[in-house]
Amino acid sequence: MAIRRAMSGRIMDRTAVFGARYMSSWWRSVQPAPKDPILGVTEAFLADQSPDKVNVGVGAYRDDNGKPVVLECVREAERKIAGNLNMEYLPMGGSVKMVEETLKLAYGENSELIKEKRIAAVQALSGTGACRLFADFQKRFFPDSQIYIPVPTWANHHNIWRDAQVPQKTYHYYHPESKGLDFAAMIDDIKNAPNGSFFLLHACAHNPTGVDPSEEQWREISHHIKAKGHFAFFDMAYQGFASGDPEKDAKAIRIFLEDGHHIGIAQSYAKNMGLYGQRVGCLSVLCEDEKQAVAVKSQLQQLARPMYSNPPVHGALIVSTILSDPDLKKQWLKEVKVMADRIIGMRTALRGNLEKLGSPLSWQHITNQIGMFCYSGLTPEQVDRLTNEFHIYMTRNGRISMAGVTTGNVKYLANAIHEVTK
Amino acid sequence: MEYLKPMEPTRIHSNGDSLFQDITLAPDIPVYATTAAYSKDPCPNKLHLGIGVYRTEEGKCHTLNVVKQVEQTLANDLSADKEYLPITGMPEFNKLSAELMFGSGSPAIKESRVVTVQCVSGCLSLRVGAEFLAKHYHRHVVYLPEPTYGNHPNLISAAGLTLKTYRYYDPKTLVLDFQGLLEDLGSALTGAIVLFHACGHNPTGVDPTCQQWEQIRQLVRQRGLLPFFDCAYQGLVSGNLDDDAQSIRMFGCDGGECLVAQSYSKNMGLYGERIGSLSIVCKTADVARRVESQLKLIIRPLYSNPPIHGAAIVTAILKDRDLYKKWTNELKAMRDRLVQVRRQLYDSLCNKGTPGDWSHIIKQVGMYSFTGLNKDEVDFLTREYHIYMSSDGRINIGGLSSKAVPYFADAIHDAVLSSLPSSTLA
């Protein structure tokens, strides 16, 4: 206390007693929180000094030199908007232009639903923010409902619905033995859930497994969800990233729309436009008619008000600039395909290398799975060995971010995986 | 909820009632409703004094020159990427923001006792702070000043904390109800959280003096209350960033703990970028470390990590001596314009002989003035003069150009006269 008194000068002299009375912190019993399983991996990777280190942990795209990529269309858009526009508050629902263009991507360029103004949609803080806003909406208006979440799923899904205080149940999804979809069990879970349950679905490029239902399977899933009167909520964070074609990647959603579901969608531009740190996304909810859409949108805005009031402008401006300019949009589609193709190429290379090494295991799931991630089937112990012995960083569920694989490191990676699995 | 009733398995969802059948249109949020009404108004003389956004003399949106300059640099910086920031935001932004508020020589900062996290605007900084308190603090009661920023009650109660108020503004004298404040905080529940506006109180423009802040500080520490500051106008009140941070620094350097939510919306004109921070001053560095780790758990399921762009602009300005100087010059010019418009409005009303004492307009500080006009008078202004403002009588001085002052003074004059009982109009 004497040191503090000397340092703080005259204000402290008279009033030291008032500080001294409260010697211990209000937060003395706050426990250190466990590290986030995904973001903690990158922290550990950054701290590693080894020149051979490989980061296949976080789902952020890297080029073949392992470097982060800012898309050319994004740079072009940023140059257009730099410094010449005001930074005043967006409306509560966010950038109208950005939301319009974003709905076209999900629902279709010429969607009747958009023309009929049946979609309640607001700009959100990327995919996380869109999911959280929906979870809060679900809690407020369907307080007795629960959310069915696939096993496994992106870890933060659990945090989001938990913090929104919506109870969670799970449904079968991944089949560890075949490293594919546990379709029969998934359908059973859909049938056995109480009528009118809420189901979280990954629209494409399932995170973390990379296992997506086929078109026929999606049709059957849609049929059973409809029969039970369930609500389908899609998290679409990888549109364009799975096949390279955004239209193709929206197939599941379009099937559900054809079948007449009233769905909800969380969309993100983090990956497909490389706008990770800009936090740009959109939450949409399909309603019966325009009047209802206006009501639902107003309620979504009410939920956003005690969070961030109105969303950030910069990322939204980049998106709307690109998508509303035919040349920039064309360029974007090209660049998305390049990213998706590189990943598909790396899947082939990784599988090829493992087979060449004479691995006794089957690695065909690497090329069967789709999108940014590969569920390798590695155990937590094997993952730990990869990290400790080979400085290879991935999440302990064995998820490999294929975007972190390059022609430069694929052999090293294959070798290390072979070493810990042979 | 009809849809939750057990249905026959063959009932097709799309033919049944909508899930959202019973959802009603939410009430308008007042400040946005005012803006919408203003936008629709075709009158060329209309004035929007309802939302806290600083405008130029020409009534235009105001992007600071230093910000435009930095944006050009950022757009041309090929080495910068758009990767995710850490959950707690840009480290350099956090460090510089803490120094801006607490002072670079702050013992608390030097002793690593301050945890600062970038949040998505001042609003989310408040919300994250409130969520932290709801989870980790033993007392779930927050005292808000009466009146306060319209969104404070929403932000605090959304985290599940209970609201109470303390007297702050005396509508009869139009100044701080200091006695009332001391009494209410003096009888507050021990350990309760108390929200303070660091400077430029919104909506009243009434701030405690330095001496009054010291008395408040002593009372707060004596009663073991936990102070939570909202700092959204640093630099816009006195024109000096350090002076405007005095209240925070008093609490930050007395060895006790506090929370501070900060926004760069107004003082750097970065409204739409949603850039702000939450700081928690802790007793020890070890506690600060643990607190930071828990803040991450709260943030991750809200938005995962904050947006880069606003943080990049702020950091560039705060860390470069020339840009910082440019910024402080522009800030001072903005503040001086606010003072000058206040004086002009006061002089106009005095010259017109408008009934009443209007000195509060020049005594109040910051972006807002609580004019003292009542709801009827405000409605009159809107109806007859197409002037849009908050129904509580608050005007945004930042939205008033000197050219528009005569018109506004006329309007107030008329409104006041029209609401006087006719016998007084002699």
Image (spheres, grey):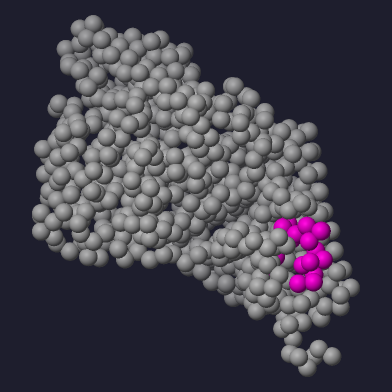
Q: For residue A299, which quarter of the picture?
A: bottom left
Q: Is residue A356 left or right of residue B194?
A: left
What percent of the width, then of the height, locates residue A88?
62, 48
Q: Is residue B401 magenta?
A: yes
Q: Is residue B178 above or below residue A278?
A: below
Q: For residue A253, which quarter of the picture?
A: top left
What percent of the width, then of the height, locates residue B287?
52, 46
Task: Identify the residue at horizontal 86%, vertical 78% (top origin).
Answer: B353
Which residue ends up furthest to the right in the rendered image?
B351
Q: For residue B95, which quarter of the picture?
A: top right
Task: Identify the residue at horizontal 44%, vertical 64% (top origin).
Answer: B26
Q: Could you tell me which quadrant the C terminus of chain A lies in? A: top left
Task: Identify the residue at horizontal 10%, vertical 54% (top origin).
Answer: B10
Give the magenta-colored segment's residue range: B392-411
Q: Is residue A16 magenta?
A: no
What percent of the width, then of the height, locates residue A349?
30, 11
> As rendered, which of A109 and A227 lies closer to the eye?
A109
Task: Identify the residue at horizontal 79%, vertical 76% (top origin).
Answer: B413
Q: Is residue B339 above or below residue B172?
A: above
> As rendered, which of A270 and B185 lies closer to the eye?
A270
> As rendered, which of A115 and B127 lies closer to the eye?
A115
Q: Is residue B377 left or right of residue A387?
A: right
**Residue A70 in sight from this viewpoint:** no
Which residue ends up furthest to the bottom in the rendered image?
B423
**Residue A196 in sight from this viewpoint:** yes
